[in-house]
Amino acid sequence: MRETLTIQEQVKEYYGRILSSKDDLKTSACCSIEDLPVQHRQVLALIDDEILDKFYGCGSPIPLAIDGCTVLDLGCGSGRDVYVASRLVGSEGFVIGVDMTDEQLEVARRHVDSQMARFGYEKSNVDFRRGYIEDLAACGIADNSIDVVISNCVINLSPDKERVFAEIFRVLKPGGELYFSDVFSGRRIPCELRNDPVLYGECLGGALYIEDFRRMLDRLGCPDYRVISQKQISLDNPEIEARAGMIDFYSITIRVFKLGSLEDICEDYGQAAVYLGTIPHMPHRFPLDDHHLFVAGKPMLVCGNSAAMVGDTRFARHFKIIGDRSTHFGPFDCAPASAKEAVGDTCSGGACC
C-alpha cells in the first residue's frame, strides 16, 4: 500500500505542481498525436483556453453516437474531454469527471458556468469528483450505471491497472463501452524505469505491455478488444531516449464492450450487418475499428463478436443484423490485412480483430 500511495503522490506532484501547462512536458507521450474528428474540433472552439492549455492527453477518446448517454471520464484533468462529451451528449445526457489532482479539478470546476452558457444549457450536465480511478465506488459511481467510459492517457499512471479495469466493467451497463487512448509498449518496462518519477509522469514508466493488457482483459471476462488507431511515439528527448530508447512506445486508441457473448477468437455464424447511415456526421460510412469499415446500406459479413458489438449495444438502432448464432460455420477470418501479411493466417490482439 505504501508503494501505491508513493506512486499516486508522485503523479499528483507532477501534474499538480511541476507541470504548469502542456508545454512543460518532456516528451510527446502525453500529447495528442491524433487528428480530431470534425465535430470534436467544432466543440473545442467553444472551450476556454485555460482548460485546453492545462490538458494532457495522447488521443481522441470520445466515441460517436453518445447523444443522451451517461459518460464517465477517468482522470479528467482540467476537463477538456468532459466538456467535449458534455456538448456531444446534449442537455439530456450527463458527464462525470473523476480526478485525484486538486489543481486540475480547480481549473475544470472554475469554467462550468461559462461552458454551460456557451453550450446553451439551462442547467449543468457535468459533475467533477475528486477520487481515484481504482475506487470508483468511493466517488459514488454505482454498478451498471454508465453508458460510456472514456479516458485519455491516464490509466497508464495507475499503480493498480487491473483494479481500474475491474471497476470500469463494474460501473458499465450491459452493452456499455470503454473507449480510451493510452500509452502501450512493445515489451515489459524494466523495474528501474517503472520507478522513475519523470518517466512515470511522462506516461512512459507505467505503459502497459500490449500482450499483458490482452491477458488482463481476458481475466476480467472480456476476450475481445478493438484497436481504433495506433501510432508509435517519438521520445524526442535525448536524456529520455538514452534511458528508454530500447522500448517501442505506442499511443493506441481502443474500444472495449461489456458483452457476455464475446468469444476469444472470431467465429463465423453466417451473420451480416447493415449500417443504416443514421449516426450523426457519418451518413456514408462507420468505422467500428481499424479494419471494419461499414458502408451505409451494404450488407457486410461479420463474425459473432462484431455482430454483438453493433447489434447488442447503443449502436443497435443504427444497424440491421441479418442472421443469429443458431448455426456455426467455424472460425471467421477478420484479421486486418497488415496482420495477415505479417504472420500468415494468425494474428495477435483482441480475438484476431
Image (spheres, rainbow, N blue to C red):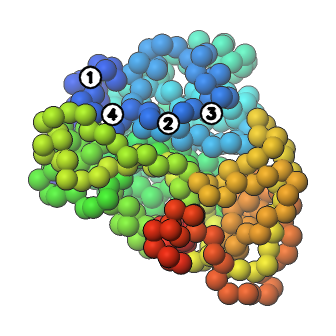
Residue at the disc numbered 3: 37
Type of amino acid at the residue the image marks with label 1? Asp
Residue at the disc numbered 2: 34
Q: Quadrant of the N terminus?
A: bottom left
Q: Upstream in the sequence, badge 3 or badge 4?
A: 4
Type of amino acid at the residue the image marks with label 2? Glu
Residue found 61% across the figure and 55% down from its top: 289
Looking at the image, residue 270 lies above or below residue 289: below
Q: Upstream in the sequence, badge 2 or badge 4?
A: 4
Q: Nearer the viewer, residue 353 or 166?
A: 353
Q: Residue furthest front?
A: 341
Looking at the picture, how far across and down is residue 299, in whole percent? 84, 63
Q: Quadrant of residue 10?
A: top left
Looking at the picture, how far across and down is residue 252, in whole percent? 45, 49
> Which label sits on residue 24?
1
Q: CA distance from mark 2 to mark 3?
A: 9 Å
